Image: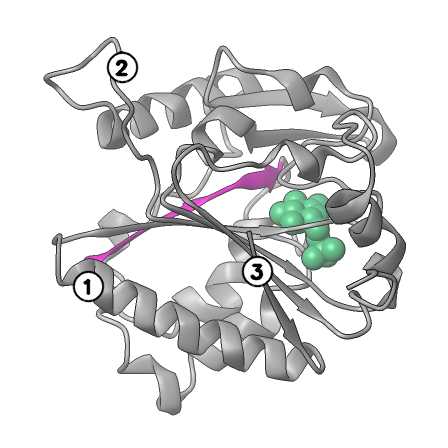
Amino acid sequence: MNIHLLENADNLSKEYADWLVDYVGKTLEKQDRFTIALSGGSTPRKLHELLATDAYKDKIDWSKLHVFWGDERFVPFEDERNNAKMAYDTLLNHVPVPASQIHVMPTNLSPEDASAEYEKLLNAYFVPADDPGGTDFHFSFDLVILGMGDDGHTLSLFPGLPVVHESSKWVTSFWLEAQDMYRITLTYPIVNKARSVTFLATGEKKAVVLKEVLEGIKNVDLYPSQIIQPEQGELHWFVDRAAASKLSR
Ligand SMILES: O=C1O[C@H](COP(=O)(O)O)[C@@H](O)[C@H](O)[C@H]1O
C-alpha cells in the first residue's frame, strides 16, 4: 500500500492530478483505452475542477478514456445529490471524452434493472471472450477512484449491511433506509480486480475512521473500506494532514 500524505486538500488534488496524468500517459503507451471508475461525494470536486483547467486539460488524452462510476445515489440525474451530475458539472462537461464512452449508472430504470444492465456492460468490457468463465485472473478497471465516508463506507458499501459482502455480482442495488433512497454500487470483487485503486480522504472528520481502517483490527462490517484490497493491482491512499492526524506513523 502507498500512502501519499499532503499538507491540505488543495495540495492533495494537485498531487493526485499529477499522479493521474503520469499513470494515464504510461498506461496508454501500452494499450489504446483507459478505463476509470469515478467516485461521488464531495471529496473529488477539487480534483475534477483542477483537471478541467487549462493547465491540466491537455495533459490527458481524454478521447481514450472510458468513464464509469463506483456508485450512485438513486435519484434523477438532475438532482444535486446525483454522483454523475457532480462529475459532469465539475469535469466531464469541460473535457473531450466521447459521450459514447461515458457510462452513467442509470437511475431511470428500476434499481434491479439498472444494476443488471450495468453488470452486463462491465461484463462486455472486462470478461475476455476467450475466458468467459473467468477462470484465469483478469484485471478490471485501469483505475478506480474511491472516497471514504466519516463512517468508513466506500462506494455504497455501508457499515453493517449485507451489500458489503456481496460477491456473486459486480453491481448491485439496495434500499438504504438511513438515507431514504436506493443505491447502486460496484461490489468489492470487481474493484479488487482493478489495476489501481486510489482512496482520497481529506479533513479532520475522517481522522478517527482513517486510523481504524488503516491501523485497526480488520472488521469490514464496521469499516467497509477495509474490504478493498486489490488482488494484483496497486492500492494508494491520498490523504491530507488533517485526515492523517490520528495515524501513528
Ligand atoms: O455517498 C457517498 O459518499 C462517499 C464519501 O463521500 P465524501 O463526501 O465524504 O467524499 C463517496 O465516495 C460515494 O461515492 C458517495 O456515493
Residue type at tag 1 = Ser
Q: Nearer the viewer, mark 3 or mark 1?
A: 1
**Residue that numbered label 3 is attached to:** 86
Amino acid under label 3?
A: Met
Q: Residue farthest to the bottom? A: 55
Residue 134's mark?
2
* Viewer-nearest of discs 2 and 1: 2
State the extent of the magenta-drawn residues as a range.
62-73
Q: Nearer the viewer, residue 62 or 201?
A: 201
Rendered location of residue 59, percent (x, y):
28, 80
Asked if residue 186 is among those painted magenta in the image, a careful observer would answer: no
Counting residues from the N terminus, which is met first, the one under dot 3 or under dot 1?
A: 1
Total marks in image: 3
Residue occupied by mark 1: 63
Nearest to the observer: residue 194 or residue 120 = 194
Q: Label 3: how many residues lie within 10 Å, few (<14), some (14-19) or many (20+)?
A: many
Q: Residue 58 placed where, x, y %?
A: 26, 82
Sequence-wise, the earlier of marks 2 and 3 is: 3
Q: Is residue 176 above or below residue 22?
A: above
Q: Where residue 160 sits: x, y (%)?
A: 82, 23
- SS at circle 3: helix
Q: Is residue 63 magenta?
A: yes
Residue in view at x 21 percent, y 70 percent:
61
Is the C-beta of the residue carrying label 2 under 8 Å from the nearest atom of ligand 1? no
Tell me: residue 8, above or below residue 44. below
Cα distance, mark 2 to mark 3?
34 Å
- Mark 3 residue CB less than 8 A from any atom of ligand 1: no
| Any part of residue 187 in sight | no
